[in-house]
Amino acid sequence: MFHGSRAGRASPRAWSGDCDVLRACGALEDTEPIPRSTDVDVIDLLIQQHRELEALFDACRAAKDDASKQELGIQLAEALTLHTTIEERWVYPAARRVVEEKLIQDSVEEHGEMTELIAQMIRARNDPQKLVALFGELEKVVKDHVTMEERDVLPKLGQKVTEQDLGMSCKDIVRTASEVRREEMQKLQGQANA
Ligand SMILES: [Fe+2]
Ligand SMILES: [Fe+2]
């Protein structure tokens, strides 16, 4: 079975799709690997990202000034986009073999809801009241979605999903998803500025 507790709560500064997670998968060759690198697989990675997303929501809420809120908000949007990309492109296709299709379809719809809320937040960046409301909505959608995944989807995949199941190593998945995330973020920014 899958253990959510294996991934500890990360500090807000611990996140970045470009830092810890990439290092954990060995995707950053010019940096020191962190000690847990050898036993990170994609399911562990998703759980770790869930905890990091929660930490980022907490950090955003606690941020004292607008600049910090904005910086953390961007980190949150990037982290979420990286995470949903990994799930939709690699993990959900593998999950379809063991989880009912409706659950996967609902999950993809919820990801779409998150993307739409992020786009609305970018558009509302100069409207603090609206931003707070959208932030609360996003947090609830993500929280409920994460609870569902950790209860109904990820445990059914077992403790390990092999590279063969996914068609790619964890390292390559994160690397490719990071490129997709960059494109997605540019697209969102472009739409918001249009
Ligand atoms: Fe998800
Ligand atoms: Fe997830």
Image: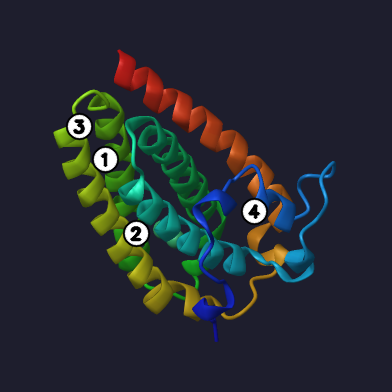
Label 4 or label 3, whichever lies nearer to me, is 3
Q: Is residue 141 depicted above or below 129 in this figure?
A: below
Q: Residues within 10 Å of mark 1 (few under 14, many from 20)?
A: some
**Residue lying at the far front of the rendered structure:** 64
Query: Distance of mark 1 from mark 2, alpha carbons?
Result: 15 Å
Colour setting: rainbow
Label 3 or label 1, whichever lies nearer to me, is 3
User: Position of 180 compared to 120: left or right?
Assistant: right
Task: Report whether residue 57 is seen.
Answer: yes
Which sits earlier in the primary sequence, circle 1 or circle 2? Answer: 2
User: Position of 74 compared to 174: left or right?
Assistant: left
Which sits earlier in the primary sequence, circle 3 or circle 1? Answer: 1
Label 3 or label 2, whichever lies nearer to me, is 3
Q: Nearer the viewer, residue 107 or 38?
A: 38
Judging by the rendered image, the residue that carries numbered circle 2 is: 107
Amino acid, disc 3: Pro
Q: How many marks?
A: 4
Judging by the rendered image, the residue that carries numbered circle 3 is: 128
Q: Assign ligand 2 to one image quadrant.
A: bottom left
